[in-house]
Image (tube, rainbow, N blue to C red):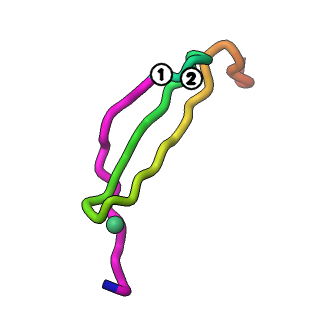
């Protein structure tokens, strides 16, 4: 399995203590990823 291409399956959403949104993904091989979205209060576009 030297050329495994990870497939990120959405594994759910969570909210951190700071109120940020955390998106969790995982591959069938066991690899996991997390993406953090800042809370809307610090939106620089606004
Ligand atoms: Zn994988």
Query: Which quarter of the figure has residue 29?
Result: bottom left
Q: Residue at x 57, y 18 (%)?
A: 17
x and y percentages locating residue 12 in the rendered image? 32, 34
x and y percentages locating residue 3 in the rendered image? 36, 84
Is disc 2 surrounded by few (<14), some (14 to 19) or many (20+) residues within 10 Å? some
2 or 1: tag closer to the N-terminus: 1
| Helix, strand or loop under label 1 | strand
**In-image side of 34 versus 43 (left or right):** left
Q: Residue at x 67, y 13 (%)?
A: 41
Q: Residue at x 56, y 23 (%)?
A: 20
Q: Quadrant of ligand 1?
A: bottom left
- The quadrant of the picture occupied by the C terminus is top right
Q: Residue at x 60, y 19 (%)?
A: 39
Answer whether residue 7 is magenta in the image. Answer: yes
| Helix, strand or loop under label 2 | loop
Q: Which residue is mark 2?
A: 20
x and y percentages locating residue 23 in the rendered image? 43, 36
Numbered label attached to residue 37: none
Residue found farthest to the bottom? 2
Numbered label attached to residue 15: 1
Q: CA distance from mark 2 to mark 1?
A: 6 Å
Mark 1 CB within 8 Å of ligand 1: no
**In-image side of 22 versus 4 (left or right):** right
x and y percentages locating residue 19 in the rendered image? 56, 16
Is label 2 in contact with label 1 (beta carbons under 8 Å)?
Answer: yes
Q: Camera-side residue: 27 or 42?
A: 27
User: From the viewer's perspective, is residue 29 above or below residue 12?
Assistant: below
Region in magenta: 2-14
């Amino acid at each position: 399995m030297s050329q495994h291409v990870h497939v990120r399956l959405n594994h759910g959403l969570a909210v951190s203590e700071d109120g940020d949104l955390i998106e969790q993904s995982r591959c069938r091989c066991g690899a996991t990823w997390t993406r953090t979205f800042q809370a809307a209060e610090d939106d620089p576009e606004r």
